[in-house]
Image (cartoon, rainbow, N blue to C red):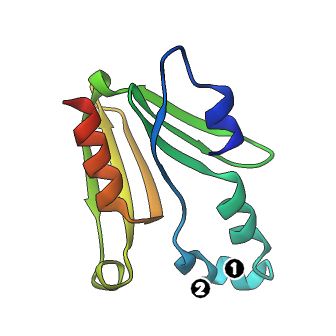
């Protein structure tokens, strides 16, 4: 488990699923221009987790962006996958919260598993 997720679990909360970036993040112009350091930092510092009570996502090393939302406040978790994404097993997770807030997280490994675990936990 990631350090951020571990440190921010509430009483009786446990991690049901952790996700990470797919290796495809190493095949981009950003990776090439940063000598593969930027995607490496992203892979080891960004955290994606579904717990029995909420979804927790933390991105960033120096400047941090966190997304934590209770299952009851999430309307839907959408998955977008290109043809290559379907073949290689990665995609974009889009979380829509009540009130219209939308968060998007691209290049996530096994996005359908993430959505399925969320659906299991919210029922």
Question: What residue is drawn where x is 29% and y is 79%?
Answer: 86
Q: Which residue is farthest top? A: 11
Is 4 left, or right, of 102 in this rendering?
Answer: right
Picture quarter with the C terminus = top left
Question: What residue is drawn where x is 75% and y is 79%?
Answer: 36
Q: How many marks?
A: 2
Q: Distance between the residues labelled 2 and 1?
A: 6 Å
Q: Residue 76: x, y in percent?
A: 23, 40
Q: Is residue 66 above or below residue 47?
A: above
Q: Is any atom of residue 47 visible in this view?
A: yes
The disc label shown at residue 31, or none: 1
Q: Residue 82: x, y in percent?
A: 30, 78
**Can you identify the residue that label 2 sits on?**
27
Is 123 left, or right, of 103 in this rendering?
Answer: left
Picture quarter with the N terminus = top right
Question: What residue is drawn where x is 48% and y is 17%?
Answer: 12
Q: Which residue is farthest left? A: 123
Q: Residues within 10 Å of mark 2 (few under 14, many from 20)?
A: few
Is 75 left, or right, of 101 in this rendering?
Answer: left
Identify the secondary structure beneath mark 2: loop
The disc label shown at residue 123, or none: none
Q: Quadrant of residue 79?
A: bottom left
Q: In this view, does 54 lie above or below 41?
A: above
Q: Residue 30: x, y in percent?
A: 67, 77
CB under 8 Å between callouts 2 and 1? yes
Q: Is residue 12 above or below residue 20?
A: above
Identify the secondary structure beneath mark 1: helix
């Amino acid at each position: 488990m990631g350090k951020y997720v571990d440190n921010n679990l509430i009483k009786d909360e446990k991690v049901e699923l952790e996700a990470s970036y797919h290796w495809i993040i190493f095949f981009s112009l950003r990776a090439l221009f940063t000598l593969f350091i930027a995607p490496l930092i992203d892979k080891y510092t960004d955290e994606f987790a579904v717990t029995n009570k909420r979804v927790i996502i933390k991105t960033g090393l120096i400047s941090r962006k966190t997304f934590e939302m209770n299952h009851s406040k999430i309307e839907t978790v959408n998955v977008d996958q290109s043809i290559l994404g379907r073949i290689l097993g990665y995609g974009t997770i889009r979380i829509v919260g009540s009130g219209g807030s939308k968060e998007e997280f691209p290049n996530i490994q096994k996005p359908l598993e993430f959505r399925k675990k969320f659906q299991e936990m919210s029922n």
